[in-house]
Image (cartoon, grey):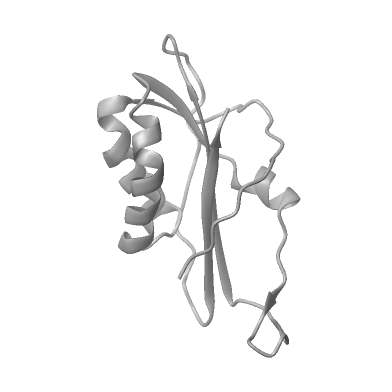
């Protein structure tokens, strides 16, 4: 049900996002991932991976930089015979976070509404630390 890959991704400084305290990380992710269209299972997998990383810091700046990331990471989907397949719904979530030594003021990022899931649904989630 999943594939892991690792590689360099260019990152610009965030212009908007969320300041998230360690103790708020899980409820924050639950709320935002629902707005981005992840199911409970997909969100749980995301939180299992990224939650402990956010919890290493007292405070984080979190931005969902999916559009920036999507410009650099493209896919061609294929069936078992190698024929091209185009998902009806492609949900991508890419989170960038950085440790904050002191709270900052940043415009809140607007998310949602979640995309409508129909037909063949492909979901990709990931992230990186700045």
Return the x and y of residue 110 as percentages of the image width and height. Answer: 49, 40
Front in this rendered view, residue 79 or 38: 79
Residue ranking furthest to the bottom: 81
- Residue at 38%, 60% in the rendered image: 42
- Residue at 35%, 43% in the rendered image: 29
Residue ranking furthest to the top: 102
Front in this rendered view, residue 8 or 22: 8
Q: Is residue 24 left or right of residue 114?
A: left
- Residue at 69%, 40% in the rendered image: 8
Q: Quadrant of the C terminus?
A: top right
Q: Is residue 23 left or right of residue 116?
A: left
Front in this rendered view, residue 8 or 35: 8
Return the x and y of residue 15 as percentages of the image width and height. Answer: 61, 27
Q: Is residue 101 above or below residue 30?
A: above
Return the x and y of residue 11 as percentages of the image width and height. Answer: 68, 33
Q: Quadrant of the N terminus?
A: bottom left
Q: Is residue 92 above or below residue 13?
A: below
Return the x and y of residue 60 as percentages of the image width and height. Answer: 42, 24
Q: Is residue 43 left or right of residue 96?
A: left
Q: State how many labels appear.
A: 0
> On the image, which quarter does residue 5 sit in?
bottom right
Q: Is residue 120 above or below residue 46?
A: below
């Amino acid at each position: 049900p999943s594939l892991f890959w690792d590689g360099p991704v260019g990152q610009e400084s965030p212009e908007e996002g969320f300041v998230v305290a360690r103790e708020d990380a899980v409820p924050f992710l639950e709320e935002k991932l629902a707005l981005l269209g992840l199911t409970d299972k997909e969100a749980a997998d995301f939180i299992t991976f990224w939650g402990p990383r956010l919890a290493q810091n007292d405070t984080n700046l979190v931005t969902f930089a999916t559009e920036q990331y999507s410009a650099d990471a493209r896919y061609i989907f294929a069936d078992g015979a190698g024929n091209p397949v185009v998902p009806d719904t492609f949900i991508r979530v890419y989170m960038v976070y950085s440790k904050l030594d002191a709270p900052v003021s940043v415009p809140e990022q607007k998310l949602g509404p979640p995309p409508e899931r129909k037909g063949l649904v492909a979901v990709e989630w990931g992230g990186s630390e700045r």
